[in-house]
Amino acid sequence: MSAAIEKLIRDVPDFPKPGITFKDITPLLADPAGLAECVKLMVEPFKGEKIECIAGIESRGFLFGVLVARELGIGFVPIRKPGKLPCKTIQATYELEYGTDTVEMHEDSVSPGQRVLLVDDLIATGGTIEASAKLVTSAGGVVIGCAAAIELAFLKARDRLGDLRIEAVLTY
């Protein structure tokens, strides 16, 4: 079915800047059968892993993360950009090509020993996932891996992420 899902991903040339081909997931989100199949395929590799919580990465990781959490019958934790969460947070900063960025989550979102699956729509360089994994582990959680709809393998996130398990429905 991933061929059918791939047909629901639209390439947008030169977005957000010249030379970038953006993988647009909005047609996938608009297709109930395709979206349901994508979520099923995101969950499948992690069946039997005793996942206790989904941590979804802002912003499109929220869309897939909540659906994955519902599919597994477990809770969802948002990982956000700074200043978006109302209670006390913990932060992780990561390197960009030019500069840094930061993600945060509520400090009480993950319990010590809790088994957490990170979910995002797309894995590019791996910086956001790396920082999100650091957040979860700094709270005492155990990161089982990361599930994504799309991986851009040519950006070599796996090199950056080392042993972190990455499962993507589509790989480009």
Image (cartoon, rainbow, N blue to C red):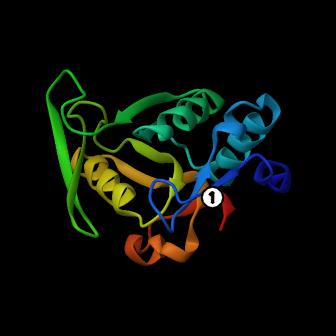
Residue type, numbered disc 1: Ala
Q: Position of residue 97 (x, y in %)?
A: 28, 70
Q: Which residue is mark 1?
A: 168
Q: Position of residue 42 (x, y in %)?
A: 65, 48
Q: Residue at x 70, y 50 (%)?
A: 10
Q: Is residue 160 left or right of residue 5?
A: left
Specify whether residue 157 is in view: yes
Question: Under tag 1, what secondary structure?
Answer: strand
Q: Tell me the crowding category of disc 1: few under 14, some 14 to 19, or many 20 or more residues within 10 angstroms, Cα based.
A: many
Q: Residue at x 49, y 41 (%)?
A: 61
Give whichever of 46, 61 is nearer the camera.
Answer: 61
Residue 35 occupies quadrant: top right
Q: Residue at x 27, y 39 (%)?
A: 81
Return the residue found at the far top.
86
Q: Quadrant of the C terminus?
A: bottom right
The correct choice, above or below, for 121 with respect to 73 in the image is below
Q: Position of residue 142 (x, y in %)?
A: 37, 51
Q: Is residue 107 left or right of residue 14?
A: left
The correct choice, above or below, for 160 with respect to 116 in the image is below
Q: Residue at x 48, y 34 (%)?
A: 62
Specify whether residue 52 is in view: no
